[in-house]
Image (tube, helix red, strand yellow):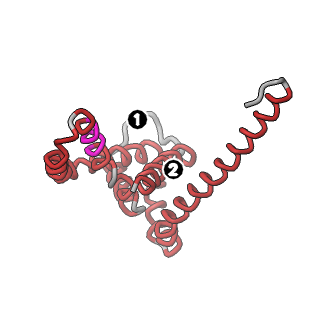
Amino acid sequence: MIGDDFARWARAAAVISAIGMFGSIAGAEQPTPQSIALAKELVVLKGSTRLWDAVVPGIIEQAKGVFLQTNPMLNKELNEVAAQLRAEYAPRTSQIVDQIAQLYAESFTPQELKDALVFYKSPLGRKIVKEEPRILDDGLRRVQQWSNKLSEEVIGRMRAEMKKKGHDL
């Protein structure tokens, strides 16, 4: 569960950084309603909305955890309230979609958004949408494995260097 949430957050970060890396700024003026609508369609078409499914439940679980720390006896009641709040706040994820669509509309011209929509509706675009979550999840696992190995190497090296200086760590 935590790994899935981390993966969703990481994918969200990847989407936002991709906007920054590949987006040519369309200009300083505010995007038109047409641009925002195109951008929102693109966000939905790419399946990006799934990235934020865990945000509201995560915030609610975090808040529940704060209250559980001070009074663990309230677990049952807090679970009930958390379930109620998840249902109540679930529609608020559309605000995230609106914010991401705004970023796309600010980063791409209307024509670029139309071209992106054409691409993501193509067989290759649909395949990328389908495969990207798996690739990102596997990529994150590989990065974690690589960083764990590097961390062990760095710790070993640091111990060796400190031993040369007379410190046994």
The amino acid type of the residue labelled 1 equals Glu
Residue 95 quadrant: top left
Q: Are marks 1 and 2 in contact (CB under 8 Å)?
A: no
**Which element is circle 2 on?**
helix
> Quick one: which residue is furthest to the bottom in this view?
123
Question: Percent position (x, y) of residue 136?
Answer: 53, 59
Residue designated by label 2: 14
**Quarter of the image containing the C terminus?**
top right
Q: What residue is drawn where x is 84% and y is 24%?
A: 165
Question: Percent position (x, y) of residue 134?
Answer: 51, 65
Q: Nearer the viewer, mark 1 or mark 2?
A: 2
Apparent side of residue 137 relative to residue 67 in the rendered image (left or right): right
Residue 167 quadrant: top right
> Quick one: which residue is furthest to the front in this view?
168
Q: Which residues are magenta?
A: 60-66
* Inter-mark Cα distance, 1 to 2: 26 Å
Task: Please give the label number shown on residue 132.
Answer: none
Task: Please give the label number shown on residue 29.
Answer: 1
Residue 65 painted magenta = yes
- Circle 1 Cα neighbour tier, 10 Å, few/some/many (<14 / 14–19 / ≥20): few
The tally of labels here is 2
Q: What's the magenta bit mostly, secondary-structure-wise?
A: helix
Q: What residue is drawn where x is 48% and y is 60%?
A: 116
Question: Percent position (x, y) of residue 73?
Answer: 18, 42
Question: Percent position (x, y) of residue 123?
Answer: 50, 75
